[in-house]
Image (cartoon, rainbow, N blue to C red):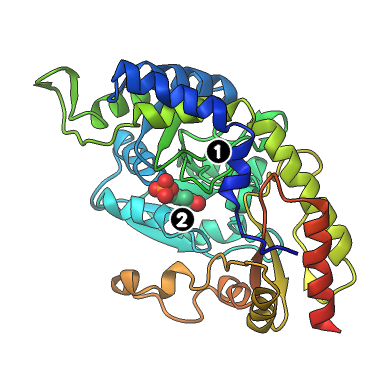
Amino acid sequence: MKHIQFVDLTRHDNEVKKEIDMAIGHVLTKTDFILGENVELFEKEFAIFCNTKFAVGVDSGSSALELGMRAIGIGKGDEVIVPVNTFIASAFAVSATGATPVLVDCRKDTYTFDINKVEKAVTKKTKAIMIVHLYGHIVDIGEIKKLSRKFAIPFIEDACQAHGAVYKNKKAGSFGMFAAFSFYPGKNLGAYGDGGMIVTNKKEIASKILLFRNYGQRKKYEHESMGWNKRLDTIQAAVLRVKLKKLDQWNKQRIAHARLYNKLLMNLPVVLPILPKKTEHIFHIYAIRASKRDKLATYLKNKGIATVIHYPTPIHLQKAYAHLRYKKGDFPVAEETALELLSLPMFPELTEKEIIFITKQIAQFYQ
Ligand SMILES: *Cc1c(COP(=O)(O)O)cnc(C)c1O
């Protein structure tokens, strides 16, 4: 068996390569590289996809989070509640606004945010609760809505791993005050470089972000507000428009892979992810919990199978956040699961044969 990559972008793009080359070619001919027509078209199409009123393209998922929070007035002296088990960009975006991330432990079954622990983290300074649909699994929206109402604190969505996930007939990104998406190449909807998007139903938020992303100007050289250069590239928008048409199909393939993995790994000493009833989990990441995790990862590597750990060090133990003065033991579930989590290869074009091969190697390791 040939080496199996964690995400094989060459195989992933094969199906759409010609169409993407053509789309890029059109942009090169037209030379509307900055806020060109593809950006606006992609924004319209992505808003329809998420069933939100507005979508504004930006240069990354991190910028989407940061500008979204700035647009609702979050800044210095404020606190935002963030799950401890997420990619650090969720917390960094809070810090970028000048506010402080207040971390909350995760659940042992889904690895997302433990809603029961959020209440204790709320203070007078809390301005928002950031939910992260980790690995592609939508957080229990019913619970979060109740909590948000109880404290009268809005919740915002980091949907950077959940493009196209659906909860009770509504898409990830359509629940919170606003939602942030990343189009980093390895995401379920990935660009040929960096990119991001904010979706919202609130016009005030969308119009603020239109200003923020483009030097605070509506008209050239008239700067109404502070602003940045955080625009989505036209070339990336052109690529993403082609890929968006395939996203639902690709997500279905990922779910099918997850079902097969679960079936084949059932009797092994590993904890399997919860399978979705429909598409509540679109498996950006397929993560198991394995005993002797590090030895297993090395074993698989030697068999030509790439794995990744999401995430090896929880945010509160990262050097970058030493100033927040968290310590070991503060978030026991995140700390414990970080020692066992292992993500297996996952991308739409992965074959049944490959999944059988991977699971056989795991079985052999535990024999
Ligand atoms: C990828 C990711 C981000 C950041 O997106 P970038 O486009 O890399 O800035 C934020 N949060 C989560 C959960 C992510 O997975």
- Front label number (1 vs 2): 1
The label shown at residue 232 is none
Disc nearer the start of the sequence (1/2): 2
The kind of secondary structure element at disc 1 is loop
Query: Which residue corresponds to mark 1?
Result: 189
Give the CA separation, mark 1 to mark 2. 24 Å
- Crowd tier of the residue under label 2, counting other residues whose Cα lies within 10 Å: few below 14, some 14–19, many 20 or above: many
The kind of secondary structure element at disc 2 is strand
Q: Is residue 125 visible?
A: no
Instruction: Please give the name of the residue rendered at 33% of the width and 35% of the height, measured from the top-left corner.
Output: 72
Quarter occupied by the N terminus: bottom right
Instruction: Please give the name of the residue rendered at 57% of the width and 70% of the height, measured from the top-left corner.
Output: 334
Badge 1 amino acid: Leu
The label shown at residue 82 is 2
**Which of the pair 48/234 is nearer the observer?**
234
Q: Is residue 228 above or below residue 114?
A: above
**Which of the pair 274/101 is nearer the observer?**
274
The quarter of the picture where residue 336 lies is bottom right
- Crowd tier of the residue under label 1, counting other residues whose Cα lies within 10 Å: few below 14, some 14–19, many 20 or above: many
* Residue 211 on image: x %, y %: 24, 25
Q: Is residue 38 visible?
A: yes
**Which of the pair 310/78 is nearer the observer?**
310
Asked if the beta carbon under badge 1 is closer than 8 A to the nearest atom of ligand 1, the reply is: no
Q: Is residue 200 above or below residue 274?
A: above
Quick check: 192 left or right of 245?
left
Q: Is residue 214 above or below residue 147?
A: above
Badge 2 amino acid: Val
* Residue 193 on image: x %, y %: 40, 42
Quarter occupied by the C terminus: bottom right
Instruction: Please give the name of the residue rendered at 63% of the width and 47% of the height, measured from the top-left corner.
Output: 136
* Residue 252 on image: x %, y %: 75, 38
* Residue 170 on image: x %, y %: 66, 29
